Every structure is written in C-alpha cells, then in structure tokens.
Image (cartoon, grey):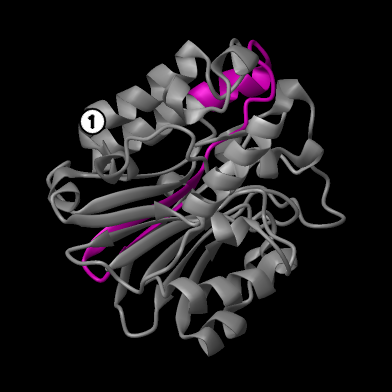
Amino acid sequence: MRIATWNVNSLKARLEKVEWWLERAAPDVLLMQETKLADADAPVMAFSMAGYDLVHHGEGRWNGVAIAVRSGLPIEGIVTNFGEGPVRDSSSGAAVETDEEDFDPLDEARMVSAVCGGVRVVSVYAPNGRQVGSAFYAGKLAWFERLRRWLVETRDAVEPLAIGGDFNVAPADADVWNAAAVHGGTHVSEPERYAFERLLGWGLVDAYRLQHDEPGRFTWWDYRAGNFHKNFGMRIDHLLVTAPLAQRVAWAEIDREARKGAPVPSDHAPLLIDLDEPGKPIDAGWAGAEERIAARTRKG
C-alpha cells in the first residue's frame, strides 16, 4: 500500500496538478490539506474519473482536509473534527470572525479520519501559529493537545494507524535550511517541537526518518525570492505511523518534482511511504537538484 500526504494549497486551483500526480505516483491513499472548499464543492466526480473515492471535510474558503482512496478499497469509520460535530462556514459571503481573540482551531476543518483498506488514516492540517506568543500560537498548541487527547481516548498504539499532513512543525534543526535564520520563530519553537514529540511519545514513528537521515530534504518552500531553487525550505509535512506500520515501511520519499512546473504547483511537495514493498517507481528529483544547488554555491 502506498500512502501519501500533500498540502495542495487549494484543491480547486491545483486540481489539474493533483490529477497529474495521481497518475504519476499511483498512491492507494492520498491525504490532502488546505483544500479550501466546502463539502458541496469537493470535486468528487473528477477523483472518481481518476479512479479514486473522495472523503472531504471542508468549511469553504479556508482550511479543509480530505482523503482520496483508490476505488475498490473499502472505506469505513469516518471521523471529522475529532468527533466534535460540525465546523464553521467560511464560504463566500459567510460572516466569519477573524480576530485573534476569536480564534478557535477546533471550529475549523482540520481533521478527517477513516479506515481505508484496513489502515486507519488521519489527514490533519495544524494551525500555522503566525507569531510566537499570539492567540494563534496558543491555539496551535491547544490543537496539538486535542489531537493527542483524541489518540489517547479513542485509538490504540498497536492498531495500524497513519497520521499524515501539514503539521507546521519542523521537528529538528536538520529539518530547516538554516536553524539560525529561523531561531525563535514559529514552526521551530521549543513548545511546538515538544507538542510534536508528545505525539510521537503516544506511540508514533516519523516514517520518513526510518528511510532517510540526510538533512536538507524539505516539504515546503516559500514561493518568494526563489527559495525553492535555493532549497531554503522546511520539512513540516509528516507521516507518523504506529509500530505495526513502522515495521512495514519499505520506502519513503518527498516528491520534489511535484513542486515544479506547470500546472502551477502548491508550495508543498507530496510525501509518500510504501508499506510491505515499493510501489510505482518515481524520480523525486533530489539528486539533480542537489548537484545544481552545489554548483551555484561554488560559483557564488
């Protein structure tokens, strides 16, 4: 089974790119974040034509999470928003509070889960946090604690479970292009990293690090200032798995090629893992990129 996660940064805007990537990488399950769609607007038919069933949990203009499952794989036990009921409506024309004092990440579409082909998968989109010390930052930490509490109260670390998504946390200095440059900011602060470690402590393993220990491999690069081509990025998208799945991880990769070219890419790249045996081969483009970056550095 191939499981992937990808912050698509608007499923409507990136649908053509996503369709291209489904054919390129042939995942069995694709977890998506920042779909930025209401459920009624989710492109169910487009995914069906590509050979996938779509489970979508959205609110409108912002956030939104989804699970695309290869047709034929059974889907059971769908859970949204930690089972706490509906979220807000942020569709066009809806009145939505945006002040710091009113920020409540548990009123936003940030979590959907289902059992797909015998594996419980969870697609999550953690709050950004914006600025250390802000109400958005406090809300981010509270959301992480809610995710951990959901695991403690409803899940078991011995079940086959994978949580994938945009966690908006770079767990270690090796996961950022320059630790000094980002020191003290969001995504790398000690409380955020501690919240991430607490998830691992429940019984999860960073599946990518089971296969890769090299620094400089990122999942997100800012659109600005040519950061992608300089490889000024962060590894903030993760697939965390329980021990039964960790033992089955046969391959893992970040598909850097999906961050390039037309159709217009997301600012995130997909992260993939294969269970039991490698799936469809892809060239993720890292070797060539590192050679080009090294050549530019020598010239500089």
Task: Inspect the image, locate mark 1, and give the three-letter code of the amino acid beneath it.
Answer: Trp
Can residue 191 be seen in the rendering of this structure? yes
Residue at label 1? 202
Looking at the image, residue 71 lies above or below residue 199: below
For this view, does 267 lie left or right of residue 179? right
Asked which secondary structure carries label 1, the reply is: helix
The picture places residue 41, in percent across and down from the top left corner, at 69, 71
The total number of labels drawn is 1
**Circle 1 Cα neighbour tier, 10 Å, few/some/many (<14 / 14–19 / ≥20):** some
The picture places residue 244, in percent across and down from the top left corner, at 13, 50
| Range shown magenta | 112-141
Near-viewer residue (90 or 282):
282
Res 226 → quadrant: top right
From this viewpoint, which residue is outermost toward the right?
Answer: 93
Looking at the image, residue 108 lies above or below residue 190: below
Locate the C terminus by quadrant: top right
Locate the N terminus by quadrant: bottom left
Looking at the image, residue 171 lies above or below residue 242: above
Q: Residue at x 44, y 25 (%)?
A: 174
The question of residue 125 being in magenta is answered with: yes
Res 234 → quadrant: top right
From this viewpoint, which residue is outermost toward the bottom?
Answer: 49
Can residue 108 be seen in the rendering of this structure? no
The question of residue 146 being in magenta is answered with: no
For this view, does 119 lie left or right of residue 112? left
Looking at the image, residue 123 lies above or below residue 191: below
Near-viewer residue (184 or 141):
184
For this view, does 142 lie left or right of residue 272? right
Q: Residue at x 63, y 52 (%)?
A: 34
Res 112 → quadrant: bottom left
The picture places residue 29, in percent across and down from the top left corner, at 39, 67
Q: Residue at x 49, y 51 (%)?
A: 286
